[in-house]
Amino acid sequence: MTAHPRVITKRMFDHPTDSHTIERYQADGGYEQARGAMTLGRDALVELVKNSGLLGRGGAAFSAGMKWSFLAPPKPAYLVINGDESEPGTFKDRQLLERDPHSVVEGIIITAVANEVHHAFVYIRGEYPKPARRLQRAVDEAYAKGFLGKGIFGTDYDLEVTVHLGGGAYICGEETALINSLEGRRGEPRLKPPYFPAAKGLYMQPTIVNNVETVANLPHILSMGVDAYKALGHEADTGTFLFSVSGHVVKPGNYELPHGITWRELIFDIAGGIRDGKKLKTWIPGGASAPWFVPEDHLDLEITKDATGRAGSMLGSGAVVVMDETTCVVQAAERIVRFFSHESCGQCTPCREGTTWLEMILKRIESGHGRPNDVDVLLDVSDNISVGLAWPPKMTTICPLGPSAVSPIISITKYFKDEVMAHIHGGGCPIGKSH
Amino acid sequence: MSGFDHRAAATYAAPSMSRWSQATQETAREIIARYPEKRSAVMPLLYLAMAEDGWLTDEGMAEVAEWTGITPAQVQSVASFYTMYKREPTGRYLISCCTSISCMLLGSDDVLHALEDESGVPHGETDAEGVISVEHAECLGACGGAPAVQVNYELIEGVTPEKARELVNWLRAGRPDVVTADEMQSLFGGRTSFDWAVAENTGAIGPVPAFEKYGTARSDGR
């Protein structure tokens, strides 16, 4: 197994007891890149981040520099950092916020300066009080040092940072829902167009929304330079990427890796393979929203955004959920669909009604009360949420939550139809998992 | 270049008939001052209201409406959207058991059952004494340390059914003033998503996330 260099998680491994303190961060040269960014100005910073190839790490993998370049007048513009990490399987931002919060704060300063923003908000999910406490302490320390507040780094540039706790709603990870939530409203996504945040976002002002991991990359890009940063990764997916690996592996955890390795390497070499000598059955390559992969077809596929997309799935937020041969795929699908049904905001009928029906039908199949045509009904309901079951999904809804619930349905009917039918014809789970 | 001066905005008058303590009113003022528009303070103020009353009462929502300049109905429409605003009496210890995919794969349903069985409280309910509430939660972001449980949003990773039972009895018998993730992890936890590295003695004093000025205390009383 090749050793892969750590970049954004390096400090927490080198200095486990104090990686979260400003003393350690500054001893490592921290905040010098933000200080330097003050003199670079918007155009140079946007160009630099565009050239670095940095893609957003929240799931959509859109060019961060490109997103910045879309920011429209007028002023004030706002910056919102998305720390509402809630995609089942994902726990990477939590580690960054708890273990290296100053890298996030420095990334916020760089992003704010690049976009001429004077007030940034960090939206952290409500179930993350400890990460929020760590970040707030880092913010307070940065204020005390003059890196935030009035006249940062001795210039005439003001920057305020407000840390905001969510209320327990996955949908607030969708950027326009997050903005509504931050305005003190129900976290319902806004219809786009016309409300693209770069033009009309928070308080109807131009707004940049970036993920926690995305901005944590910025100090490193500035310190090592664009060429060195790009060389860490793969041609189209530069830098490193945090994979959250969970499920039936020997060593679950967050792994900072370059793109371009294979799934075999990730699951078997890095995450230690399947527990108790069991066999790999299937895995989710990019969070609960992503269609599943199976060993026969995908184990030697390169892990890149493009290769994963061509194979009909996505890397999303980097959450890899591994399931072994003891897993009942109906129960697994039910658990994922239940999540989306619970988290549907209710605005769009295909999502609100569709996810509810999918959950109910999966529950009856799992409990042995499946009907002979239930697979057809599942696919028909899915088609009403996500037309033609295409990948990437064709939208019938304001946001992608509804179509996400279709992914496990597509997966189990494509790869495990026999197992689903065995539930229906055999009156319950053939591997003894259902209750 | 001058940005938005959030400190100068701290000029909102308190509602004339506030039920809240002076300290809570002061906190409410500080929170509102951090936002360009006071409506943005609805969510943190809802946590303050819960911390004052133990759960989110109609009076609490009316108070938040006064502070933020919207109607009680608007506040309720916000509160009802989010799972963490508990509009029914909630136990002093809210036990949330994650049963989403990664936790389910590693036995979370047995952990939830153990919590319900030992406490006598089915998920979604509270015991008669108002001490323990049990709920099942969707993904808590602890998938690498599955199965995960939170008490008042303080996290424990790698929980077994046996440890879940011990947790219930520890809460019932000891009635700790403050619950902290690190203490509970050392007593009832197992494998974690990542190395927690440094223990913290800050924790929660009720079913409200322990962040800054709402629901937070240090276990050593400082």
Image (tube, coloured by chain):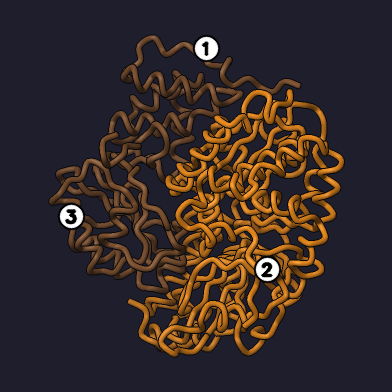
Residues at marks 2 and 1 on the same chain: no
**Rendering coords of residue A101 (x, y %):** 55, 47
- The answer to whether residue A7 is seen in the rendering is yes
B121, B155: nearer the viewer: B155
Q: Is residue A199 above or below residue A413?
A: above
Residue type, mark 1 in image: Thr
Marks 2 and 1, Cα distance to the nearest angstrom?
A: 48 Å
Residue at the front extreme, as displayed: A27
Task: Look at discs 3 and 2 and give the one toward the viewer.
Answer: 3
A404, A422: nearer the viewer: A404
Residues at marks 3 and 2 on the same chain: no
Residue type, mark 3 in image: Trp
Residue B11's label in the rendered image is 1
The residue beneath circle 3 is B170
Residue A314's label in the rendered image is 2
Marks 3 and 1, Cα distance to the nearest angstrom?
A: 45 Å
Q: Is residue A232 above or below residue A373?
A: above
Q: Is residue B27 above or below residue A230?
A: above
SS label for mark 3: helix
